[in-house]
Image (cartoon, rainbow, N blue to C red):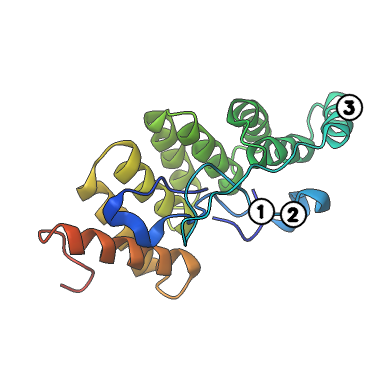
Amino acid sequence: MKSDAIAYGIAGVFFGLIAGWIIGSQQQSAVRPAPAAQTAEAPAAAPGGSQTRAAILDEAQVNALKSVAEREPSNAKPRVELGNLYFDAERYNDAIKWYGDAVKLQPNDVNISTDLGVSYYYMNQPDKALAQFEQSLKIDPKHAKTLLNIGIVRAFGKQDLDGATKAWQDVIKLAPDSPEGQAAKRALDSLSSAHSGINKPGQ
């Protein structure tokens, strides 16, 4: 996923304002290959109703990175980059394999952990996604992108609106002016407009 990107939430009718929000963790620029520095795309409606398309997988780059990974079994970087490439190409099962290998090598990297969780979500495994996000929070309990992801997976993967509300409120408390905080505010506004029992932060 892109360094300034956040994986698309699957938007419901009353979640239209957050349709197309990218929710994955931010990879540091040091672990993102320049040719793949593009917005991570997934099969969800973007704002305005346009449909996104997966990035075309660069097989030459994939093969080069696999060669590096084979030569350097303790190097997480090529594995993260492979995960990024496969994620951008919507080949989430392959992304899980490479992110999983990378997180074994760098278990304290919250970004890799959260990207792995987002990949589980897109493979229709919300429980695994949430379990991975819990691992991310053990590394950094205040990681805004992880909390934003938890809210989206709880809302769209588990239909747990109370859990989603709590996660998004936590994002707003931690980083109200960040892109994640703004996304959480929009999500809560959409949710409260459809469900009068949902309280916004401060209410």
Mark 3 residue crowding within 10 angstroms, few (<14) / some (14–19) / many (20+): few
**Residue 43 visible to the viewer:** yes
First reached walking from the N terminus: tag 2 or tag 1 = 1
For image coordinates 60% across by 37% down, the residue present is 107
Q: Position of residue 140 (x, y in %)?
A: 48, 52
Mark 2 residue crowding within 10 angstroms, few (<14) / some (14–19) / many (20+): some
Residue hosting label 2: 37
- CB atoms at circles 2 and 1 under 8 Å apart? yes
Q: Position of residue 35 (x, y in %)?
A: 82, 50
Q: Nearer the viewer, mark 3 or mark 1?
A: 1
Mark 1 residue crowding within 10 angstroms, few (<14) / some (14–19) / many (20+): many
Q: Position of residue 113 (x, y in %)?
A: 55, 40
Residue hosting label 3: 67
Q: Quadrant of the C terminus?
A: bottom left
Q: Identify which residue, 39 or 103, lies in the foreground.
A: 39
Dot 1: what SS?
Answer: loop
Q: Position of residue 180 (x, y in %)?
A: 46, 63
Q: Is residue 138 above or below residue 173?
A: above
- Name the amino acid, label 1: Lys
Residue 50 is marked as none
- CB atoms at circles 2 and 3 under 8 Å apart? no
Residue hosting label 1: 2
**Residue 143 visible to the viewer:** no
For image coordinates 84% across by 34% down, the residue present is 65
Q: Nearer the viewer, mark 2 or mark 3?
A: 2
Q: How far separated are the C-alphas under marks 2 and 3?
A: 21 Å
Residue 181 left/right relative to 160:
right
- Name the amino acid, label 3: Ser
